[in-house]
Image (cartoon, rainbow, N blue to C red):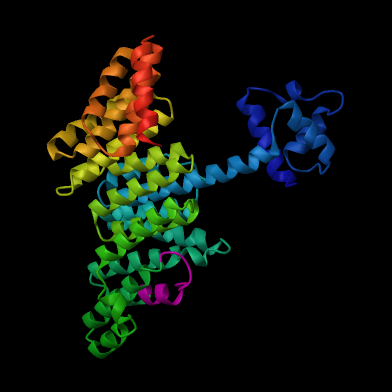
Amino acid sequence: MDFKKVGELIRKVRKDRGMTLDDLCDDYIPRTTLSMIERGLTHNPVKVRYILRKLDINLTDLSKKEKEQAEDQELELIILENRINSEPRKTLSELSKFPAEYNRPVVDFLKGRCYYKTGQYDRAADFFNKALRVLEKSVDHERTNLKPLCLNHLSVIEFNQGNNEKALHYVEDGINSFDLNGERQYYYINLLTNKAIYLRGLGRAEKALKTLEEIKVNSFDINIDAVIGIYDLQAKLKREIKLYDEAASCAIKGLELARVNYNYPRQLELYITLGEIYRESGKLHQAEKCLNAGIALKDKISRRQFLIQDAYLKLGIVYFEKKDFQLSHKTLRKALNIVKIENDMLKYSKALLYVAKCFLSECKYEKALSTFKNVYELDSDDKTNLEALRGLSQASLLLGDETNYIKYSKLYFGTGI
């Protein structure tokens, strides 16, 4: 048992519930002992578990909750990082709300990127340097490759100000500190390319060419859009065989590549894929976040409008599964409006099916029956038709219409499931 961590949790729960030390202590655990437990100074598991029972805290649930919270925080930062290119000021405002202990070096790095995108280069440099100072005091930060990223941004700032030697110094430090087996491996090519640019600016053409030779030809010439598409396909395939963690990892890698290449349609596509992964694995909160983050890019999408309708449809389904039927209905209506323009009848019938399900769940049986009929008459794919028949039989039963209940039930079971 991690007595310090458990003690901090006990203190947090007590304060969240508006309890004082005197409210919680008793004859068995006096005030001084309780204070020591909260500070992690009492290593008596019996007494600690006694307090946990009093507060109805389950340590098994705690471990799961901590994991989910960490995953949620990581997802929040991923979403904000992907938003910087399109909405740097809004992202900076969101980052400024984070508490001091919230993954400090990453938050400082992202703030630096926000200031860089808005042309405030001195402020950007301040935050990149601040992140570097925090990283120097950290352990096991090498795999994140956050240090090389900060150094690379500092190099670009110096280069834009005409300080080629300083720019070269920063980028070489970034290359030397890069973990080739760590995160954001794609960024190594960016560092080498910038080094070559700076060497050329200093009149060192031969060294610049030698630097470029370090980049593998197949990596240098590769079609980035194709690579992103492969990550998306891998994520979808892994989702289909229920390897959700691996699927999410593929989607996040693709999302990073889409972001650094300003590929907004691919970002939206990968947010939809990631949202589906989270939804199917029961993580509806994360699914909602991903799909809303994708929809926020809609003004950046000039082509592939079907992605926007798909995002609204998937989000409507998430809200339905969260039993927020009013919000589900509203979101699905947005999907339907776009689908009419795109003339995609499969998507139209799917959206309409969930509108009918919302009516059924809200006990609006007449509306549900009418909408299920519309879906069935569209003669969509077999799965949607079966769900429509099932809905028709349920609505008929709830309306006391035995004749139609029997009729639709026979059609449902006669179609084959």
Q: Position of residue 364 (x, y in %)?
A: 34, 13
Residue sitting at x 38%, y 44% = 275
Is residue 230 among what the camera can see?
A: yes
Residue sitting at x 73%, y 37% = 38
Residue sitting at x 38%, y 57% = 126
Q: Position of residue 40 (x, y in %)?
A: 75, 43
Left or right of 107 on screen, residue 92: left
Instruction: Examine the rendered structure and indicate whether residue 204 appears above or below residue 140.
Output: below
Left or right of 108 on screen, residue 298: left
Q: Position of residue 208 (x, y in %)?
A: 27, 84
Q: Position of residue 294 (x, y in %)?
A: 30, 44
Residue sitting at x 24%, y 56% = 263
Instruction: Examine the rendered structure and indicate whether residue 132 appears above or below residue 50.
Output: below
Residue sitting at the far right: 27
Closest to the observer, 2 or 336 = 336
Is residue 120 among what the camera can see?
A: no
Examine the structure image and report whether residue 179 is included in the region drawn in magenta: yes
Number of numbered discs: 0
Instruction: Examine the rendered structure and indicate whether residue 249 appears above or below residue 14.
Output: below
Q: Quarter of the image holding residue 32?
A: top right
Closest to the observer, 366 or 268 = 366
The residues colored magenta run 170-184
